Image: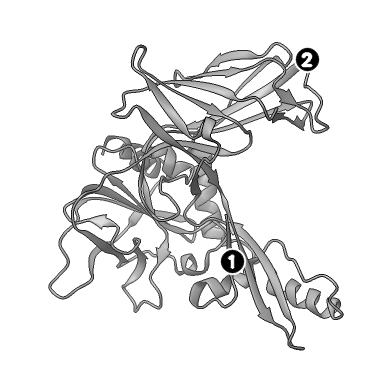
Amino acid sequence: MRINSRYVAGGIAILLMFGACTKQLKNDPNATANANLAASAAAAPTPDPDGLKLHEFLRSNGPGFETVTFSGQEGATIRVKSGRIYTIPRNSLLLPDGSPATGTVTLSVKEINDAASMIFADRPTATNTGAPLVSYGEFFVTANQGGKPLQLRKDSAIKVQAPAKVEFQRIPMWNGDTTVTYDQSGYNYVNQLITISTTISANKGIDWDPVTNPASAYALFDGTNGTLNFRLDSLIKWVNCDALMSLPGTKTTVLAYFNANYNPATNTSYMGEEPTMLYFKPTGVNSIIKFYNTIFTPPPGYEGFLSYQNAIPVGQSGTFLAISSIGGQFYAEQKTVTIPTPAAGATYTSLTFNPVPVSAATLVSLISSMNTK
């Protein structure tokens, strides 16, 4: 995902400090000066150790890859643990030079099928506008031969058949991007306009955009055998089979205050490794909404997160899971609520959280229990 901005205020402006790559205008007579400016602006900080510890812990307990080998020129039909069937056409995988991958190839599949896995993998379901999605599965497929990454032939696709109980005849497909790139322009010390591109991990975990290829844009339900059927037309990319969630009623903005054990490094964590996180699961829905917008300049006791503006329905029931990592200790609180009506004259609804110390095993158990909420 790429966001363009010339003048940026508040938190986004800080992103100039956290870039992983830079660009500058061509034919610039002050190229050296501009390169030095870009390099100093884009110096990446060391990831927060508490956030790094938490995210490494989550990933280590999250979904892994299922790997199979087969003959590239013959193709294969593969059934994974979830019951989904992946059909790879013969001669559909290409080496980096564009030639067909013959002989033994390795295919790896990672699936995210439930709320707990969405939290462990930090892959919540929401569009770029904040609209929540109910998930019928998230998929990441890679293939290689002898350590060389393979791609799909342009006129080919992997066909997926998924056992499912759905209310719709077709469900939209979404591509996922785990990074965000900001293009920021400004004037340097000799009044020349330069642009710096900053690429960072997406704090929301992943950005979902609709698949634009008409042949792969929807999963189609086959009522004769109770399956969803869709196509993957590229590899090494997250793909989501999700329906837009219908959340009727009056919407409000939810502010989540942490009265204790909020790690302030979260406010400047643009590396995708926040030490404090908050997730919300609507009752009975296979979806996770991540609260990733932090409250700006809060007084003590009001650190925390807020939802998208007017995005959460009043009266919506669901379960929150607050997680923190501070000084090597994990903290957590699970809270089931019904979103209340804002107070008279208020433009928001507030909730409070007080995460308490928990063991690693307890944290895994709390996350896993989100599947039943």
Q: Where is residue 337? Give x, y as percent.
A: 20, 52
Amino acid type, label 1: Asn
Q: Nearer the viewer, residue 355 or 25?
A: 25
Q: Quadrant of residue 362?
A: top left
User: Which quadrant is home to the C terminus?
Assistant: top left
User: Does label 2 or label 1 sit earlier along the sequence?
Assistant: 1
Q: Is 267 drawn above or below residue 358 in the view shown? A: below
* Residue neighbourhood size for the residue with mark 1, other residues' Cα within 10 Å, grouped as few (<14), some (14–19), many (≥20): few
Q: Nearer the viewer, residue 363 or 221?
A: 221
202 to the left or right of 118? right
Q: Kindly identify the residue that appears in the image at 24 percent across and 66 percent down.
A: 350
Q: Where is residue 27? Give x, y as percent.
A: 86, 73
Q: Kindly identify the residue that appears in the image at 68 percent across and 30 percent down.
A: 154
Amino acid type, label 2: Gly
Closer to viewer: mark 2 or mark 1 = 1
Q: SS for tag 2?
A: loop
The answer to whether the residues at label 2 and label 1 have Cβ atoms under 8 Å apart is no
Q: Nearer the viewer, residue 216 or 340?
A: 216
Q: SS for tag 1?
A: strand
* Residue neighbourhood size for the residue with mark 2, other residues' Cα within 10 Å, grouped as few (<14), some (14–19), many (≥20): few
Which mark, by number, is residue 4? 1
Which mark, by number, is residue 354? none
Structural distance between the alpha carbons of marks 2 and 1: 45 Å
Q: Which residue is mark 2?
A: 103
User: Which quadrant is home to the N terminus?
Assistant: bottom right
Q: Is 152 drawn above or below residue 132 in the view shown? A: above
Q: Kindly identify the residue that appears in the image at 38 percent across and 34 percent down.
A: 114
